[in-house]
Image (spheres, coloured by chain):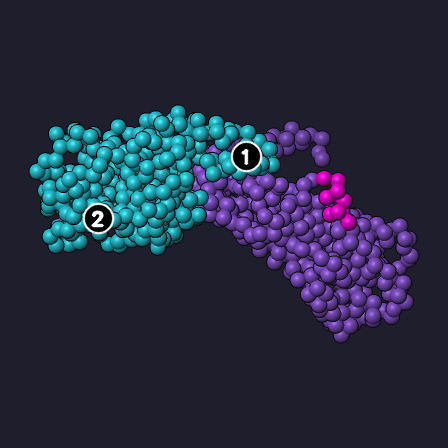
Amino acid sequence: MRVTRRRLLAGAPIVASAPLASLALADAYGADSHMMDGHMMSAADMAAVHTSMIGDAVPAPDGPDVILEPPRGYEPGPVRDYELVASEHSIEVAKGVFYPAWAYGLAGQAPSVPGPTIRVTEGQRMRVRLLNASDHPHSIHFHGIHPANMDGVFEMVDPGGAFTYDFPAAPAGLHLYHCHATPLKKHIAKGLYGALIIDPERPRPPAQELVMVMNGFDTNGDGANEFYTVNGRAFYYARHPIRVSRSRTVRIYLVNITEFDLINSFHLHGEFFRYYPTGTGDTFEYTDTVMLCQGQRGIVEIDFKNTGHFMFHAHVSEFTELGWMGFFEVVD
Amino acid sequence: MDADAPAPAAGRALRWRLWALVPAILLIGVVSATVAAGDSLDGLVGNAPPPADEFAVRRVEFRPGAISIQVTNPQRDDLTLAQVTVDDALVPFSVDGVQGARTLGRLESTTVSVPFLWVEDDPYTIGLISSTGIVTTHDVAAAVETEQASLHGAAGLAVIGVLVGIVPVALGLAWLPSLRRAAPRSLAAFMALTAGLLTFLMVEALAEALELQSALPGALNGTGLVVLGVASSYLGLTLVAGRLSGGGDRDRSQPLGGVGLATLVAIGIGVHNLGEGLAIGSSLALGELALGTFLIVGFMVHNVTEGLGIAAPVAEGAGSIGVGKLAALALVAGAPAVLGAWIGGFLTNDLLAVLFFAMAAGAALQVVVEVGRYVAWRAPGGLTSGHVVGGYLAGIAAMYATGLLTA
């Protein structure tokens, strides 16, 4: 039962089609090795710099695995059970750069930063058991509505210990969860966070869905991020563009958990989208750029009118050039 | 040697050499055992701290459309370069022509090339990120295209070397006719002035060597290099002084004087100008120095006093000296500035710069000692006369005052 649910959540990843897509893109930008040969740098090379990460065609084995398939065959049940394990785990945050993260993972699976997406339907009983397999006390603090003794602030889980968070999911919308142990900044920056989707009882219209958690990594401990990513790996979606179909709506569950920097943002090229703040209502802004502080989140819905490669990135140029950039490959 | 003795004597010598091998063999054994024990020794006293994982950036060059970074791994262990940033932006890079990450062994050096459309005169920050996410940053105050090894560039550096090295020394030597007519007391004062300015150069060179060595990777032991440079040039010049004074035949109680002493002074100043030329050449090449007319004039005025320092012992000495010999002295003292400028302009030079300045300090010290002995022997009233003390202080003051022009 749980295995099925897990598979549903992890989804048959869209990245499976990425290697081909990235090769095609590398070709389009002429980003083969000749750009390094001479001293001179041409305008074509400049274009290639933006996509310099392209060419590494094979996704890393423990790359992010949080892209969601649309919840097909989704069967709401009375209780949603999750078992999360907090542990210390080295993750590759940029090509060749490894970070000693603290990460949540589903029991029996490799942990990841961001952690697994937890998805329930409003009103369902949400039961999340946290097992602490690390050397530090941790907790899970869910954003949402719940009793005070389920808040992850007073119920610290010591190393080797466990705690079950058990409450009805509310309100419908897009939320997040993160560790609330002190020092808080450290526990978040190290990677203990993830997205929490509470679907409304009347499901949203079908769409190609994916989660994007915007974050950063302070790899040298200077209190500032060296890398910025969505879903944990710098330039991942630049190397492996996300292939989507033009005829279907793309729905992004967008969460910002970036530590140290006051804001992050999301900007889409060549298209506008509907932005539903926190995903709690029907009102939206029709725009191509949104700004989010830490903990802020919203649902993005895109109806692509054109095919081709469309860039998306933080409209904080520094973040863009430190890894928070990718492409949609829109196909018919 | 006794005709009957050679066999036992040779045997004794052989035995002595064999016994001398014993400590070396024992050392090899102990080292092997320690290496075999390996990591088990690390845990004897606490835990070893994690590696710092910082690189040593030796030189950053700006070429048209590219930035070239010479980097060394100063750590005990291998160090992997995983990412490179320019002004907080990840950039594609290649190492020795191969794109992407590269692992460097201990003290291994390599050149990282980044295709980049840099802006002339803009400041840049280069970041080298290890596989463990540690960032080594290197600031460039202003990007200026690095002079490539070319005839044109070499000629330019040579002109600068001649202007700041040979010309002022030659001008200073022109004081010779007037010094020849000076009273013995005044001449003693000028000899003391020579010692004073060399003392100034010695301290200046030593300070420069120590400052430069502090920027070297710790594993290269810059302090030891300074000691080595000072000692080798001091002792080397002592040997030269012995040769100039006619080998061991001459009475050692009589110090070296005249042209011999002038040659020694010229060598001491020449070694200093080697370092000075190197500093100017590398600063120019890396765009750290705007060598305007004012600065060239400053170096010229500063170095004219060096010519005076060479002229004084010549004037003090007996006998005449030809123009050819004077020109040779000017070349010995000034030409190394040209050589230094070339080395500094075209090569990675931080090690050489430390060594050169250390050698300059040692050479200057030796010449101060040599001049001091001469003044003590010749000057009316010896080392404690007012002329000598005044001349010595005047030498230091002159170097200080003219040095302000080069700051």
Question: Quick one: which residue is furthest to the left in this view?
Answer: A78
Please tell me whether residue A295 is drawn above or below residue A232 in the rendered image: below
| In this rendering, position of residue B107 left or right of residue A161 | right
- Residue A44: which numbered mark, if any? 1
Counting labels gives: 2
Residue A211 in the image: state x and y as whole percent. 28, 39
B121, above or below A160, in the image: below
Quadrant the C terminus of chain B occupies = bottom right
Query: Which residue is painted at 50% across and 35% down in the image?
Result: A48
Q: Main secondary structure of the magenta part?
A: helix
Name the chain under label 1: A
Queried whether the magenta region covers residue B153, the answer comes back as yes
Residue A206 inside the magenta-drawn segment: no
Which residue in the rendered view is the most extreme toward the bottom?
A: B386
**Quarter placement of the N terminus of chain B:** top right
Is B246 positioned to the left or the right of B121 in the image? right
What amino acid type is highlighted by mark number 2? Gly
- Vertical placement of residue B386 versus B136, above or below: below
Task: Give me the chain that's cyan.
Answer: A
* Relative image position of residue B91 (x, y in whole percent): 49, 40
Mark 2 falls within which chain?
A: A
Q: Over which residues does the magenta segment extend? A: B150-159
Looking at the rendered image, the disc whose residue lies closer to the viewer, 1 or 2, is 2
Residue type marked 1: Ala
Secondary element at image label 1? helix
* Quarter of the view holding residue B180: bottom right
Q: Which chain is purple in the rendering?
A: B
Per the image, label 2 sits on a secondary structure element best described as: loop
Q: Quadrant of residue A124?
A: top left
Residue placed under numbered mark 2 in the picture: A281
